[in-house]
Structures are given as C-alpha cells and as structure tokens.
Image (cartoon, rainbow, N blue to C red):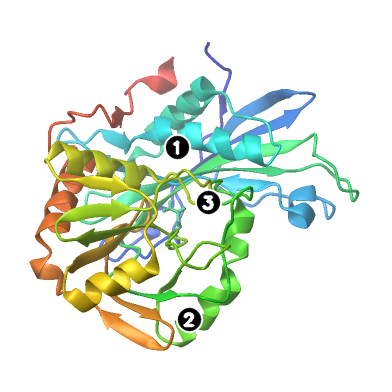
Amino acid sequence: MAYKISVQKIEKSHIGEVDFKNLPFGKNFADHIFIADYSDGEWRDCRIVPFGDFTLHPATSALHYGQALFEGMKAERDAEGNPIIFRPEKNIKRLNVSAERMAMPTFPEDLFFEALDKLLTLDHDWVPKEPNSSLYIRPYMFATEKYVGIKVAENYRFAIFSSPVGAYYSQPVKVYVHDQYVRAFPGGVGYAKAAGNYGACMLPMRDVRKLGYDQNLWLDGIQHKYLQEIGTMNVFAIIDGVIITPSLDAGTILDGVTRDSIIRIAQDEGYVVQERDISIDEILHAHSKGTLEDMFGTGTAATIAPIRTFYYKGKDYELPPVEGREISNKLKERYFAIHSGKAEDVFGWIHTVPVNVLQN
Ligand code: COI
C-alpha cells in the first residue's frame, strides 16, 4: 500500500557547516525528519519536514512513564554513489517487538520503508563519502498522550532522523564487569530497545567511566554469573578457536543486528559458533589457561569493537593484542565489505534506496 507522505523541503541545507573529515558520533543532523502521529488506533499525518525541535506538552506521558523506544541503522554508498542501508528489515521487526513489550502500537513495515526511502533520497548528500563514516539513522517512538495518570497511552509519535557519524569507539574498549548493578532479568525488558534500559545504565556507566572504563559488561540479574551484554553492544568471546556469545533465550539481551550478522558470517566462513550461557568463571578460567583468544562487542553504532581489558572483582584482565586476533579481524573485514557494498551481498542484507522515490 502506498501511504501519503507529505514533503516540505528545507529552504537552505546546512550541510556546508559540517566537517565530514572529522565526524563525531551523533552531533550533526541531516536536513529532514520523518514524523507520524498515532491517534484513534491509526498512524496519521505522515510527513517529512525540515529537521527541528518538537513542541511537547508538559504532561507528555513518555517523559513521566517511559513508553519510549528506538532503533539504530546505518547507510553507506555503493560503488555508484547510491545510498544503501544495512538490514533495515531486521530493525523494523525489532522495533515492533520492542513496541509490543512496551504496550505501544506497532509501526507498519511498508510505511517504514516508504518513509526511509523518501527521507534518504531527500538527504542522500548526507551519506558520507569518507572512509570509516556512515549515516546513522535513528527511528524512534514515544507516547505523546497528555495525561498524568498511569495507563497505556493512546497517542504516540514515530520519527526518523539521521546523523552523519564517524567511529563510536576510536580505540579498543575497556569494560567493567559489574557484580553490584544489573541491567536485565528474565521477564523484564532486556530484549527491548526501550529507552529506559539505557537510562537505568547511566549511573553505573558514569561510575565506571570515572575509573577509566568505557562501559559495563553486564552479568545476569539473578546469579551475577553469566555474561549478558555491554549496553551499547552484544558481547562475544573466542576460546580455543570457538566463537561464543550469550544466547537470546532468556530474553535479557538485545537481538543485535550486528550480532546476528557476525554469527552468520562466521558460520559461512566455517567457524564453530555457540550461542549459549557463558559464565564469568569460564572466561576467567580460559584467561588463566591462555585460551581466551579474543573478546569483542558488536553493535550498529559501535560496529565490531575489540575489548582490550576487562575488570572483575578488583582486577584487570588484559586480552591479546588486536593485530593478532585473526578470527575477529577476518569477520570484521567481511562485515565492513558487505556493509559498504564492496563485497557480494550473498545474504541479501543490503537495501538500496531506490532513486526517483520522491516522484512516486
Ligand atoms: C546502536 O548501536 O545503534 C545503539 O543503539 C546503541 C548506541 C550506542 C547508540
């Protein structure tokens, strides 16, 4: 079904003000934003307008009770210069999984693609040409009902904006394995990309940053024993040549698009991949025996980020030099090649933004 998306173009682009050679993460914004509002059970008033502030009622319920969620995707350019988006169908499916968990309305997949194609056609100049850069695309949804009582809201806003970005982590990361705070537990919202999951991690993140670590590596919320995720990334370990990552079964970690891509590339390359419980004791044991070859995080923003150090109960554990990490370096190279349209898209992961979409 074709939706009616009205388009109001910006009068003068501000792209000239952006230094594409030195792109920080998430501080520059492309010219346009897509917005849709939900009322009486339907998404309405779909529009692309110049990027700018929202006006919000003080009782906007997302601000009080947290019905808010988001997604992250990236676009690069193919050899002909057309914008290509990596696996957006995974993101809209996950957005709708998060929406169900947060009792929010789902967003129609076909409308999502129509909005994305129109927005990216309009803002295609914002997809960086520079190496190690991309256009980060942020779809999100929040409750807009003006009501102070606690109930499932009846009004929502869905929007998509984009931001040209460089690396999220410019160095291998140091993570802090927490045995006090937890991020998620079975029955909770750990698998949803709900804004509150990130809000709950701010205090521990601020604490560990003061100690010189980049992020927390979360353990399970009940026994404080099994690895979950890093908050900005899923986590992988390589022990004796076997690639291991926590499984999705407990519903406590995000079903990461990069996580899934790395698993599938690794299997395609013939590596053994295990999605299973992995305890901190197993990691420590492998480290002491010298069989812990690698640990890394995966995420859309962070891509594949090698872990150089992890802290646990008073001690730092160093991991092997990144240059020698043959397996993850190989997986990373193939992931980047597919992501940027340089390698054959054998998995069918690339969405090419169709030209002429604005004329349709
Ligand atoms: C992403 O990787 O897209 C995220 O949502 C996490 C955040 C680090 C930006």
Question: Which callout, 3 or 1, points to the residue nearer the camera?
Answer: 3
Q: Looking at this view, is 114 or 328 the one in front?
A: 328
Q: Position of residue 232 (x, y in %)?
A: 44, 60
| Label annotation for residue 91 | 1
Q: Amino acid at mark 3?
A: Thr
Tell me the element at label 3: loop
Q: Which quadrant of the frame does ligand 1 lie within?
A: bottom left
Q: Position of residue 216 (x, y in %)?
A: 46, 71
> Is the CB of the residue bearing disc 3 within 8 angstroms of ligand 1?
no
Say few, some or many: other residues with alpha carbon within 10 Å of mark 2 (under 14 / 14 to 19 / 20 or more): some
> Is the CB of the residue bearing disc 1 within 8 angstroms of ligand 1?
no
Q: Amino acid at mark 2?
A: Val
Quadrant (top left/top right/bottom left/bottom right) for the C terminus: top left
Q: Of marks 3 and 1, which one's residue comes earlier in the chain?
A: 1
Q: Of marks 1 and 2, which one's residue comes earlier in the chain?
A: 1
88 versus 256 height, above or below:
above
